[in-house]
Image: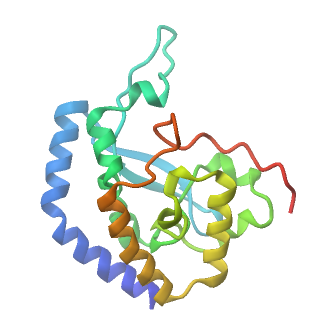
């Protein structure tokens, strides 16, 4: 049932947001050039890698040694706007249609984090990652990694279709308000380095 709803809702949203997709694509192309989409391998169900799609929000500026500058230095005004209203996430509807993701679930993080999870945190891999989730409507990027993982674990252990619908509805409110898009003094979450406690 969840897979059917994921496919149907994502298909309808792609049709409804086709105009927005086109406008954002043209804006990214004009302001940041190609590629328009950011693609990266992320862990899916049971940690199996898949290619995640997002609109680019950063440029490719590098220092004198050829290394990329920090996220803060590469974030563009267009990118900040896209992140604030989650417009950069729209291409992930394609991931949902392909079956790599669900509309609701723990956010897909970096592959390098997989060996850093403790037992409680690793349960997030027991379900498909989502475009939005319980952690996103309860703080998004403004909460700590430990808080985020506890919320993800709670969702995995208590998920129902009714809860998913509640999360989807609350997500729209959070997006409109542009709440919790980043931690203080950071344009995105700091890298996860593992938890101090062992479970």
Front-lying residue, 165 or 31: 165
Q: Where residue 136 sits: x, y (%)?
A: 49, 63
Residue 45 visible in the picture: yes
- Work out whether 35 lies above or below 175: above
* Left or right: 13 as drawn, with respect to 43: left
Q: In the image, what residue occupies the spot 52% across and 43% down?
A: 183
Q: In the image, what residue occupies the spot 35% across and 48% down?
A: 83
Residue 90 visible in the picture: no
Q: Where residue 109 sits: x, y (%)?
A: 57, 53
Q: Where residue 53 sits: x, y (%)?
A: 38, 53
* Left or right: 133 as drawn, with respect to 110: left
Q: Where residue 38 sits: x, y (%)?
A: 38, 44
Q: In the image, what residue occupies the spot 17% across and 57% down?
A: 20
Residue extending furthest toward the right: 198
- Work out whether 58 lies above or below 183: above
* Left or right: 29 as drawn, with respect to 184: left
């Amino acid at each position: 049932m969840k897979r059917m709803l994921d496919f149907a809702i994502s298909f309808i949203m792609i049709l409804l947001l086709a105009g927005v997709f086109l406008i954002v694509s043209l804006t990214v192309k004009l302001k940041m050039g190609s590629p328009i989409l950011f693609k990266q391998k992320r862990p899916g169900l049971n940690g199996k890698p898949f290619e995640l799609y997002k609109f680019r929000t950063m440029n490719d500026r590098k220092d004198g040694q050829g290394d990329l500058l920090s996220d803060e230095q590469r974030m563009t005004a267009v990118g900040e706007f896209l992140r604030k209203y989650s417009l950069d996430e729209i291409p992930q509807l394609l991931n949902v249609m392909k079956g790599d993701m669900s509309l609701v679930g723990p956010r897909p993080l970096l592959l390098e984090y997989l060996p850093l999870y403790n037992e409680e945190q690793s349960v997030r891999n027991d379900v498909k990652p989502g475009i939005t989730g319980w952690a996103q409507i309860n703080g998004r990027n403004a909460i700590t990694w430990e808080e985020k993982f506890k919320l993800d674990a709670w969702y995995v252990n208590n998920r129902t279709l009714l809860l998913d619908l509640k999360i989807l509805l609350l997500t729209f409110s959070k997006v409109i308000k542009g709440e919790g898009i980043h931690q203080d003094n950071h344009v995105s979450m700091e890298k996860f380095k593992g938890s101090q406690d062992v479970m």
